[in-house]
Amino acid sequence: MSGIQLRSYSGNVFRFDPGALCLELLVTGGPGALARFEVLHTPADLVRWVEECRLTPTPASLEFTDDDVTYARRLRDALTRTVVTHVHGSGLPELDVAAADSADRQAINDAAARPSLVPALRADGSRGWAPGAATGTQLLSTVARDAVDLLTGPYAERIRMCAGERCYLLYVDTSRPGRRRWCSMEHCGNRNKVRAHRARHSEEEPTRHTS
C-alpha cells in the first residue's frame, strides 16, 4: 500500500500519499506552528522515515548522523515554505509559516548539487543502489532533486493543499481529471462526507407541528 501512515490530531490513523518523495518529507514537521508535529529528533528517526517513504528499494545500509538530522530539518523547512508559496503565492500566516525567499531556494539548490543516491541494476534485473552505505547527504540530495523535478515539471500546477478544515498537508494531484481535494479519502474525505450527510439530513428533517 502506498503512502505514509499518519496520526491526526484526533488520534485517527490513516495513510497519506502525497505523490512525490519530496512531499513525503514535509509530513515530518516544519516551520512555525508545524514544529509541533516534529518527528525527526535522532538518526533513528530519519532511518524510520526512509523505511516508510516511497524510495524504492530502501537502501540496505543507512549511515546518518545528528548533523544529518539537523540538515534534513533545515531542508524540509525550506521545501515547506517553497511549496506553500508555490501553491498560495504567499506563506501561511495562521501557522506562522513565512513565504519562501532566496535563501530557501538556495538551500534546495545546494542540496540538489551534492552527490545523490546512485541507482544500480542488480544481477536479477531489479533496481538497487550502488554499493556502500547511503549517507544523509546523498539521501537529501535525492529529495532536493525530486523537488526541483516536481516544481519545474508537468505536475507543478497540480500541487495542492488539502481542502479539509485545519489540514495543511500538501500533495501532487496525479489523478487524470485533476480534481483531488483531500489528503486522504479515509481521513479528510470521509470527514467531509459525514458533514455533508448530516447537513442533508438536517435539511430534510420534517418540521414538527403541535396541535
Image (tube, rainbow, N blue to C red):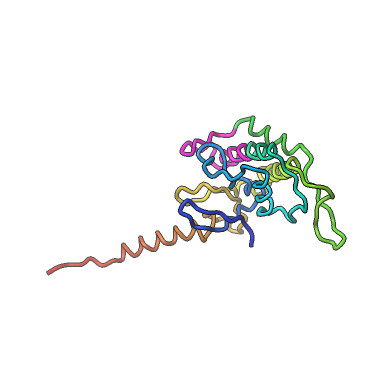
| In-front residue for pair 65/153 | 65
Is 75 left or right of 120, judged from the image as shown? left
The region drawn magenta spans: 76-100
Residue 174, horizontal then vertical, whole percent: 62, 55
Q: Quadrant of residue 76?
A: top right
| In-front residue for pair 18/72 | 72
Is 204 left or right of 120, judged from the image as shown? left
Residue 144, horizontal then vertical, whole percent: 70, 41
The structure residue drawn at horizontal position 49% and vertical position 51%, both measured from the top left corner, is 163
User: Is 84 colored magenta in this rendering?
Assistant: yes
| In-front residue for pair 70/167 | 70
**Position of 167 relative to 137 (above/below):** below
Q: Residue furthest bottom?
A: 211
The structure residue drawn at horizontal position 77% and vertical position 43%, both measured from the top left corner, is 116
Q: Quadrant of residue 203?
A: bottom left
Q: Quadrant of residue 58?
A: bottom right
Q: Residue furthest top?
A: 102
